[in-house]
Amino acid sequence: MTTNQGLKVAEDEHSLKAGSRGPTLMEDFHFREKMTHFDHERIPERVVHARGFAAHGEFELYESMKDYTKAAFLQQPGLKTPVFTRFSTVAGSRGSAETVRDVRGFAVKFYTEEGNYDLVGNNMPVFFIQDAIKFPDLVHAVKPEPHNEMPQAASAHDTFWDFVANNQESAHMIMWHMSDRAIPRSFRMMEGFGVHTFRFVNAEGKAHFVKFHWKPKLGVHSLVWDEAQKISGKDPDFHRRDLWESIEKGDFVEFELGVQLIDENDEFMFDFDILDPTKIWPEEQVPVKIIGKMTLNRNVDNVFAETEQVAFHPGHVVPGIDFSNDPLLQGRLFSYTDTQLIRLGGPNFHELPINRPVCPFHNNQRDGYGRQTINVGQVSYHKNSLADNTPSTSSEEEGGYVHYEEKVEGRKIQARSDSFKDHFSQAKLFWNSMSKTEKKHIVDAFSFEVGKVKSKNIRQQVVDMFANVDVGLATAVAEAVGAEFPTDVEESQVTETSPALSQMETVKLP
Ligand code: HEM
């Protein structure tokens, strides 16, 4: 063992003292260095998705996507690209239990020969809000309440449901959140979704809108609520243990990558806006095309250095993959680097081993906290003729990323298309696609979670809101949480699939 200066250490159990019973001496540099480093071991946890676990692997392409995108890692069938994938819960802190009812993060970093591409998704295909400006409000409502830091659970408290009732664009996501999808059996058994609409651009400059899907080879499986609660108590590390152990024993974890594609000319062919992140593209209308497989086959060596220090960003793209004007995505493009600047201590976190691209990277950025690279030479500016023998005429390197030339026109406004105001059609679609047992689980989930809300007024608002999805659902929840049955509902809202109350055993609250 040596000090950080390389000096061999002779004594690591007793600090240097003035006499056998005297005070410790400031002079003991080894003690000071050891203690100082320990004192600085913690970094801030992620503001969301703090509790996560990750593994290394590879992505193999089945089928060339060259008709749609020029992304190098999507050209040659059989090409393998290294990946690093982090799964997470959203609301709980870094030490919280893993089998709670929550959304799961599903973030994949592809280390491509053209630079890192991050697909930063969730295990649900839609989101709570439509515009990034509401994200701080959403997270303040979801996280433990600020006056007493309770509860760790995302959805069993007043501020969560107060937000939902007053921001009704959340209706569709809440249906997923109250379903069995929010309590996955294993990270290996859940889907992943890019959620937003992105854009593929091919070598000829032709674009398609694209949504990304991960499909687990093991199929989608959930826990039931009673199991989830018991496991939370007995093994709060249940999901990471499952992932770790299956990789350790060679039972590697496989997900297929699928894409939904819409030709740019068909942008307005749907009765919803394809840029609305609270809407899915129904697979009957836009089928999912499976294009490759990810295999997670290596556990991390060190959770801090890899799982914690990894920095994902939906704006890390490669040529051939571009953004859409989804207003949620646009805001995310700002947020991730901004938070990582503080979480990872300054502007040089791209130099951390887990974040480094596998291809060479260089530019005129320099200095700053934690800088590892020794930039050599006199010149760190563009354009110049001191270092570059021939001054470049263009700022683009050959093969460099060129933003898609989308035509944009309009007046500066703070609104979106009218269909953004339709909060219930797809929430209903979701409910109507559920089996009787799944519906029962959803009613039970609402009853449990809303039943924890202290404010009678909020419980009532939630019941009234979800009567817009299904009256049977709302009535069953009303009965369980002591709210009035929904009254202000049009006859047309009562669907044939509404479970008759008599068939639906309601939950008894503790
Ligand atoms: C993590 C912001 C929506 C998926 C984060 C972090 C921030 C953030 C600040 C912490 C990043 C870090 O410390 O490294 C936002 C904002 C959103 C938004 C502002 C909306 C405006 C979404 C959506 C998805 C998503 C829609 C899924 C499609 C994730 C995932 C992580 C994450 C998976 C964890 C990444 C990891 O494992 O390190 N988000 N987020 N977020 N977000 Fe978002």
Image: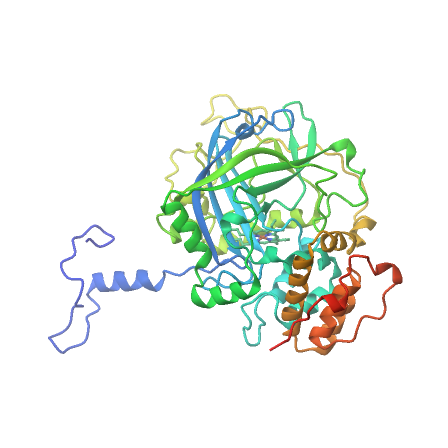
Q: Quick one: which residue is furthest to the front in this view?
A: 503
Q: Residue 455 in the image: x percent, y percent?
A: 69, 77
**How does the figure colour the protein chain or chains?**
rainbow
Residue found 31% across the figure and 63% down from its top: 36
In this view, 317 is above or below 432 = above
Q: Residue 163 in the image: x percent, y percent?
A: 69, 66
- Residue 437: quadrant of the picture: bottom right
- Residue 508: quadrant of the picture: bottom right
- In depth, the one of 357 and 453 nearer the eye is 453
In this view, 240 is above or below 355 = below
Residue found 84% across the figure and 60% down from its top: 493
Is residue 246 shown left or right of residue 432? left
Q: Quick one: which residue is furthest to the top in this view?
A: 390
Residue found 38% across the figure and 47% down from its top: 300
- In depth, the one of 262 and 149 nearer the eye is 262
- Residue 373: quadrant of the picture: top left
**Looking at the image, can residue 501 be seen?**
yes
Q: Quadrant of the C terminus?
A: bottom right
Q: Quick one: which residue is furthest to the left in this view?
A: 19
- In depth, the one of 238 and 332 nearer the eye is 238
**Looking at the image, can residue 369 be seen?**
no
In this view, 363 is above or below 481 = above
Q: Residue 496 in the image: x percent, y percent?
A: 81, 57
- In depth, the one of 506 and 280 nearer the eye is 506
